[in-house]
């Protein structure tokens, strides 16, 4: 091999002395042959490549992908169900729950201040955006859907006194929701370092956004002029796939073709099934010599079909034949299942949620749910980081301008601290999940607070309600076995009868009789 390599190099040097271009081409192609096989195009391998920068790729395809994704969201039931499930798993019915965590100088949670912040936050959540149309959970679900479907979404922060606008809550803070179309992708100015409508500084940090006064898709009254909004007054939620990418790309970008093909195939199969269902039988005319033309030309014969009917008026040479229907296609579900699994893999989701197919054992369902929920957790973290946390902190900064009183022992460094709670993984079998949590808590591997948060609830609120409930029951003499204080410690056997615990073995080898609690 070494001898052949030296011989090839000698040949190339000899060729290069006479024809340099030929020699360089020969050396280049020899290196390609010795390189990775996947890098070399062939008859069976296209070796498609992407050499453009991230922003150039988005500029060329972002608008088309965004508009195709919107069309699918309006017309494709699978895409509608996919985005609906994303809303349920990432945001949920109550939105991202926030637990303020202000602490004193000694490190203790200031429960009264935290409670007041929760109440004020709930009051602002009724009308958090400028139009007053959506509550905060509704706003967050729409923002999430726009983010995943379109690739990015914007929110202009409206603080304090604004001309021609009146805040809908007592807090002088609101959000103006803007679809990605308001910041045009085709607005580029190298002189001002504007890339796809966003002005960057020397470190590629956004410093301003050029926003259209109207949506470019409006039918009338369109104003194509833009206004510059400081990055400090704008929230930008973008789904980025590459470094240095300024604008986001649709979550559906890799599965749009598959989804379109799936819709076309299903529609063709539905049409075929409808046609097949309409066909009943045919009449075979026989040999041409036996054919007798119908008496009335242009008027097809009709038969009243009913159970047990017979044909007693067939003409000479005619024969009745039945049409064998092969619709619906029995293999369609198998093919469709494979396509939906690929769709789920490309959309950070799981097959069961998209197909609404929940067959399988408890272990298999939980395994799929655990793996699928990791994808939801990633999107939850991104949504909180780019939207929920900035919104809460801006709201709290505006709330400080109202009549909010801060306690003197507050550690101001912790004023904006909070815990952000997104929907958690649902329980398939509550009994098994509860037993697992009890085991972890008893073993010191978890806490009651973590258990309560795993159900998507506020631990402080649950414990407060529990204390009030126990006090009420004691006051009125209500005794239930849901209170651990009333639990006798006895267990029931399979027949429903109570049995005592077995004798406990002492460390010294002796025995102590367990007290019989069954009376």
Image: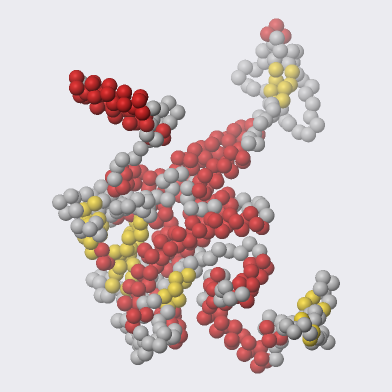
Residue 402 visible in the shown view: yes
Percent x, y of residue 428: 63, 62
Say whether residue 124 is left or right of residue 232: right
Q: Indicate whether 129 appears above or below 251.
A: below
Residue 20 vs residue 67, the one in the foreground: 20
Q: Indicate whether 447 appears above or below 383.
A: below
Q: Quadrant of the N terminus?
A: top left
Residue 53 vs residue 303, the one in the foreground: 53
Taking the spot 64% from the left edge, 73% from the top edge, the residue there is 438
Say whether residue 38 is left or right of residue 82: left
Say whether residue 20 is left or right of residue 310: left
Taking the spot 23% from the left edge, 21% from the top edge, the residue there is 14
Percent x, y of residue 91: 47, 64
Q: Indicate whether 146 appears above or below 93.
A: above
Q: Indicate whether 312 appears above or below 410.
A: above
Taking the spot 73% from the left edge, 16% from the top edge, the residue there is 318
User: How many marks do you count on the picture?
Assistant: 0
Point out the residue furthest to the bottom here: 475
Point out the residue furthest to the top here: 289
Percent x, y of residue 470: 63, 87
Percent x, y of residue 216: 29, 51
Q: Quadrant of the C terminus?
A: bottom right
Residue 133 visible in the shown view: no
Say whether residue 359 is left or right of residue 7: right
Taking the spot 36% from the left edge, 59% from the top edge, the residue there is 237
Point out the residue furthest to the left here: 191
């Amino acid at each position: 091999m070494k001898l052949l390599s030296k011989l090839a190099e000698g040949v190339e040097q000899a060729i290069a002395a006479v024809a340099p271009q030929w020699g360089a081409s020969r050396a280049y192609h020899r290196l390609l042959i010795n390189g990775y096989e996947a890098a070399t195009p062939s008859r069976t391998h296209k070796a498609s490549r992407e050499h453009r920068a991230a922003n150039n790729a988005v500029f060329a395809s972002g608008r088309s992908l965004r508009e195709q994704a919107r069309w699918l969201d309006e017309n494709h039931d699978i895409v509608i169900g996919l985005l609906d499930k994303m809303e349920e798993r990432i945001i949920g019915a109550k939105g991202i729950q926030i637990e303020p965590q202000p602490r004193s100088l000694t490190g203790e949670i200031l429960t009264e201040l935290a409670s007041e912040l929760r109440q004020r936050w709930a009051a602002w959540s009724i009308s958090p955006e400028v139009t007053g149309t959506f509550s905060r959970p509704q706003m967050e679900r729409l923002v999430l859907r726009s983010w995943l479907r379109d690739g990015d979404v914007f929110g202009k922060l409206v603080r304090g006194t604004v001309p021609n606008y009146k805040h809908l809550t007592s807090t002088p803070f609101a959000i103006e929701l803007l679809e990605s179309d308001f910041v045009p992708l085709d607005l580029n100015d190298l002189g001002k370092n504007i890339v796809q409508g966003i002005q960057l500084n020397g470190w590629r940090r956004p410093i301003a956004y050029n926003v259209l006064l109207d949506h470019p898709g409006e039918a009338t009254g369109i104003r194509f002029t833009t206004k510059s909004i400081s990055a400090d007054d704008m929230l930008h939620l973008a789904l980025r796939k590459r470094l240095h990418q300024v604008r986001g790309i649709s979550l559906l970008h890799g599965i749009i073709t598959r989804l379109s093909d799936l819709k076309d195939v299903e529609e063709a199969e539905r049409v075929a099934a409808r046609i097949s269902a309409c066909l009943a039988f045919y009449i075979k005319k026989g040999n041409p010599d036996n054919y007798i033309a119908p008496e009335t030309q242009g008027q097809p014969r009709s038969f009243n079909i009913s159970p047990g009917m017979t044909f007693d008026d067939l003409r000479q040479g005619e024969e009745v034949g039945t049409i064998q229907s092969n619709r619906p296609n029995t293999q369609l579900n198998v093919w469709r299942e494979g396509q939906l699994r690929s769709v789920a893999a490309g959309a950070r989701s799981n097959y069961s949620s998209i197909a609404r197919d929940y067959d399988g054992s408890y272990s298999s369902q939980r395994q799929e749910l655990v793996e699928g929920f990791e994808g939801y957790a990633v999107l939850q973290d991104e949504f909180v980081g780019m939207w929920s946390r900035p919104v809460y902190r801006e709201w709290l900064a505006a709330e400080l301008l109202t009549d909010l009183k801060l306690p003197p022992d507050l550690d101001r460094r912790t004023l904006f601290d909070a815990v952000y709670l997104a929907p958690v993984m649902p329980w398939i079998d509550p009994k098994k999940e509860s037993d697992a949590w009890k085991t972890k808590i008893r073993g010191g591997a978890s806490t009651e607070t973590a258990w309560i948060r795993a159900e998507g609830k506020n631990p402080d609120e649950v414990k407060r309600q529990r204390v009030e409930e126990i006090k009420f029951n004691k006051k009125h003499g209500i005794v239930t076995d849901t209170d651990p204080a009333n639990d006798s410690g006895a267990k029931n056997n399979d027949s429903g009868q109570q049995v005592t615990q077995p004798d406990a073995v002492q460390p010294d080898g002796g025995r102590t009789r367990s007290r019989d609690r069954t009376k």
